[in-house]
Structure formats: structure tokens, C-alpha cells
Amino acid sequence: MMKFLRQWLIDKFLGFGVNEFYSEFITVAILLIGVLITGIIVDKIAREILLSTFIRIAKKSKTKLDDILVEKKVFAAIAHLAPVIFIFYFIPGIFDHHEVIIDYSSRLSGVIIIIATMVIIFRVLDSLRTVLEFIPSFKDKPLRSYFQLAKIVIGIILGILILSIIANKSIIYFFSAFGAMTAVVLLVFKDTLLGFIASIQLSANDMIRVGDWVQMDKYGADGDVIEINLTTVKVRNWDKTISTVPTYSFISDSFKNWRGMEETGARRIARSVYINQNSVRFCTDEMINRFKKIHILKHYVEERQAEIKIYNEVNKINTEEVSNGRRMTNLGTFRAYLLEYIKRHPKINKDLTILVRQLAPTEKGIPIQIYAFCSDIAWVNYEAVQSDIFDHTLAVISQFDLEIFQSPSGGDFKQLLK
């Protein structure tokens, strides 16, 4: 049909006295413009039909896949194939007897169809990844990495196919040349390959998931994992900055994953107060009587007194000398008080370790460490509980005739001079 129309127009122009060259040139220009305009119309019609049809189907369907296919514009990409096929179907008829132009237009049509197909495949893969992310069993898997690798493989294969069409050579020729360039390819895609291997190891060993709180000081990362892809892991830090860490680094370097804390439902408190060593002493009768008035200490003091008294009597120890026998100290009683206080705190997990311990003395004094687990793991609430405990600890220390150690400040020196 196109050849007939082409010859008919040439004959008409020849009849009007136009020479053969210009008659053919004008005819080709008119037909080419007409086909391009018709192709644009075909594109709009194809998009309208496909989109309207599948949007209606998506609205009636209960599955998410068709909705996501529409959202990712998969059907719009498919619709673009119609004008391409239409235009290049009529090109040989327009350029009849011009074998070189027909050959190049045929190659160009093949390249454009392959590119359009690649776009469709990539959008379908994006849709599948989005669907899988809604499935609980896949929610914490590095799906982005797997789909990125699939895109790379498909892109390489279709790219080689495009080269074979452009060069008019067999695809086997390019695959054989590609095999000879394996070393170069491995060098170019080193990070991609390492990232893919790391993604598989991270997934297989369940080392990291999207949503995990991770801490990696080497890269300044301390926050929630928001994305795991083929080459990088994105971490949203608590200051709302984004740290990008190479995926392979999670295999080769050490990092801290706080998921265990979140799954346990408890967050550790391990902080110390430093006691001035010069304030530690044996308890006097007056101090013991005062400690008995403290509600949570009364039972401990009475038991401890009875235990010490029995020990000293059995061993016939002369208690007139304070260094003889066993005696209560203000620091030991303070530790017992803190332990009882922590055990009674409503926000402390009673099923996990609770202890108040004395660490090795330093030049800053004697560290008394509170070691327990807060049952509220939310950061703000956890900090509030921890602060509340140490506010109370610092305020009650003077009740045991103990002093907090702190380095002297300018105000201390001014007071000394006065």
C-alpha cells in the first residue's frame, strides 16, 4: 500500500512538471511526516486504550500488583511500542529502492524496540520488588540488591544485542569478545560483585535488616537502616543526616546492631558515679540508727547487724577496736540502698541482670556502677528513666555521709583564696 501511494504521488508531481529527483524527495518528505504524525496519534490512542482498560481492571481487582503496575507506568511503556512498530513498518515502503536507508532504519527500529523492551522489563521488576516489600517474609531482605543485579545482567545482555544489531554481526561474536574482557569487566564491576556477595551473606546470616539500628563508627553511621542496595547501605543517623556505607563493609568491618536490644524489649543502663575515697568509713551507731529509718533499707540493716553480731561473737572478736571483726560501711550500705532502689523502680526489667557494683578505684575516686535494663527502649523515655535514677542517686549520697568526686573548678579555687 505504501509503495503504491509513493508511486502515485511521484506520478502526480511529475505530471505537474516537477523533475524526477524533486518529485521523489517531496513524496518521501510528505509520507515521512504523515507517518510520524500518524505514529503520534497511534501512541496516544494506544496509551488511552491500554491505560483506561487496565486502570478499570486495577480498580476492580483486590490484588496490589495491578495497581503497582499502573503506578510504575508499565502499560504506558508497553503502549510506546505501538507507534514504533507502526512507523518502522512503513519506512521500507517510503524509501523504496534505497537499500542503505532501509537497512539503517531496520537496525534503528530494532535498537529502539530493544530499548523500549528494556524499559518495560525494568518497570516490571520495580513493580515486583514493591509487591515483595509488602510481604512480611521479604520485608527485611535486601531486595533492592537482587533486583539491581537482575537489571545489570539484563542491561548487559540487551546492550550486547544492540551492539550486534548496530554492527550487523552475530551476538555470539560479542559474547566471545566479552569473555576475553572478563578481567576488565571484573575490575569495572568489582564493587558491584562484592556488594552482591555481601548482600547474600548479610541476608543468609540475618546480620542486618531494613529498620535495624546499627552503629558503625568508622563511617560515622549511628541510626536506622533505610535502604540496602547492591553497593551501599543507607543509614539515617539520629541527627537526621544520611550515612552511605559500602555494603561489603558490613562483612569486612565490625559494626554494632541494636536489634537484639529491641527484640528483648530492654535497654541497658551501665553508668557510674565516682565517690571520694576519703569519705568512706565504718558506720557508727548513730549512722546505723539513721539508716534504719530509711524504709527500703530497714530490713537490710537489721539482717546485716544480726549477721555481723553473730560472726563477731562466734569468733570472740574484741569490737572495741574498729579494725577488728566485721563492720558495716557507709559505702556498702549505700550500694545496698541503690540495689533495692533499682529493684523497686517500675521501669526496670526485673527478669534481666540488676546489680550495683564497685569498680576498680581510679584517680577520680571509687566508681559505683549501676547495671540494669530499662524496660522502655524508646530513646527519649530511656534517657528520662536513666536521668531520673541518677538524679536520685546524686541527691541521696549525702545521706550516707559520702561525697561525690569532681575535679576542682575556678569557683573552688576562688573559695579557697577567700
Image (spheres, rainbow, N blue to C red):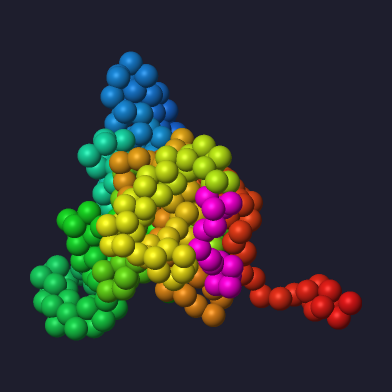
Disc tally is 0
Looking at the image, residue 401 sits to the left or right of residue 345; the answer is right
Is the residue 26 above or below the residue 60 in the image?
Answer: below
Is the residue 234 above or below the residue 91 in the image?
Answer: below
Which one is in front, 105 or 224? Answer: 224
Looking at the image, residue 66 sits to the left or right of residue 245; the answer is left
- Residue 252, image x, y percentages: 27, 74
**Would residue 322 be visible to someone looking at this image?**
yes
Q: Residue at x 22, y 54 (%)?
A: 206
Is the residue 110 above or below the residue 410 in the image?
Answer: above
* Magenta highlight on residue 285: yes
Which one is in front, 61 or 265? Answer: 265
- Residue lying farthest to the right in this orientation: 418
- Image quadrant occupied by the N terminus: top left
**Would residue 177 be visible to someone looking at this image?**
no
Which one is in front, 298 or 209? Answer: 298
- Residue 66, image x, y percentages: 31, 29
- Image quadrant occupied by the C terminus: bottom right
Looking at the image, residue 310 sits to the left or right of residue 205; the answer is right
Looking at the image, residue 337 sits to the left or right of residue 60; the answer is right
Q: Residue at x 59, y 61 (%)?
A: 402
Which one is in front, 190 or 73? Answer: 190
- Residue 416, image x, y percentages: 82, 78
Q: Residue at x 20, y 66 (%)?
A: 197
Magenta stretch in the rendered image: 275-288
Residue 256, quarter of picture: bottom left
* Magenta highlight on residue 210: no
Q: Residue at x 31, y 52 (%)?
A: 310
- Residue 287, image x, y percentages: 57, 52
